[in-house]
Image: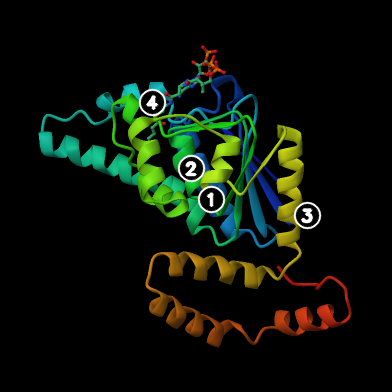
Amino acid sequence: MQLDTIKITLENHIALVELNRPDKANAMDERMWADIRQAFDWIDDEPAARVAVLAGNGKHFCSGIDLMMMMGLKARIEDPCEARSREKLRRIIVDLQDCLTALERCRKPVLAAIHGACVGGGVDLICAADMRYTTDDAYFCVKEADMGLVADVGTLQRLPRLIGEGQARELAYTCRRVSGTEAVQLGLANRSFADRDTLLQSVMSIAADIARKSPLVMRGTKQVLNYSRDHSVADGLDFVAGWNAAMLMSADIQEAIMASMQKRDGQFRD
Ligand SMILES: C/C=C/C(=O)SCCNC(=O)CCNC(=O)[C@H](O)C(C)(C)COP(=O)(O)OP(=O)(O)OC[C@H]1O[C@@H](n2cnc3c(N)ncnc32)[C@H](O)[C@@H]1OP(=O)(O)O
């Protein structure tokens, strides 16, 4: 899969997605927003991809929205009719939201590996991943308020669920930087590593563990977790009962039990 601003490599069932504008600190220009959606829609659809790792090429993971794109917004929504102009802007915002929701919509687990700076839209992006891993010296910044805008592509909705209301509000109101080690204490990242190489190696190894399991079960687990996060416990239990009534009796359950008894890895279809 060839995209302008993103490199995708699929090997051993792991799709490595690399933000690839290193000369611009992986700033998200119009192409990159669209490429992110295309990449994760493709991974969702590609049977050989069982898990995805999202990383950034160069010195930083992501410097947020491309400031040139921000500056160009006014011209894009120009219209003699005020209402039509506002409608255009709303459509642009909804579309950008959807580009990042593609990570959540993708049925395969998405692991973000963050080094260097992760700023503004970069935080919106990683909040839509399943798990986040980082380097000790990386830093995270919910930068939108300092840029004169209300964050509108996912951070304010997803971050409080990851780290709690109080901590999320502090980060959104103050725009202070959080280091990789603090991100782990807050629960924003699962683990932090000494440097980028160790980070990538470790995240690829976690991804490999996931890729060895039944892809059907991994896809189901993600969808049930997503549903349960957004609904009551009772609704979540109801949903998973329906899910497993349809999916439990698979070849995978037999293979997993046999493999466990024979102390070997299970062999599963994509
Ligand atoms: C809805 C979403 C909202 C948001 O995302 S709001 C937040 C928007 N983002 C920002 O305000 C971050 C701006 N960038 C920075 O603060 C810094 O950069 C970094 C801390 C990320 C990195 O600093 P350093 O390592 O010193 O690199 P460098 O020389 O500043 O940047 C390297 C090249 O990257 C370009 N660049 C960096 N960030 C952006 C950006 N967000 N939009 C467009 N270009 C960017 C620079 O200009 C420069 O380029 P050249 O070498 O050609 O001068």
Quarter occupied by residue 138: top right
* C-alpha distance separating marks 3 and 4: 36 Å
Q: Nearer the viewer, mark 1 or mark 3?
A: 1
* Residue 12 image label: 3
Position of 264 compared to 82: left or right?
right
At label 4, the amino acid type is: Met
| Pick the front one: 75 or 148 | 148
Disc 4 to disc 1: CB gap under 8 Å: no
Residue 214 higher or lower than 206, as above or below: below
At label 2, the amino acid type is: Leu
Disc 2 to disc 1: CB gap under 8 Å: yes
* Residue 86 image label: none
Asked whether mark 4 and ligand 1 are closer than 8 Å, the reply comes as yes
Identify the residue position indicated by label 4 in the image: 69
Identify the residue position indicated by label 1 in the image: 129
Q: Earlier in the sequence, mark 3 or mark 4?
A: 3
Give the residue at x 64% y 51%. Answer: 52
| Pick the front one: 105 or 196 | 196
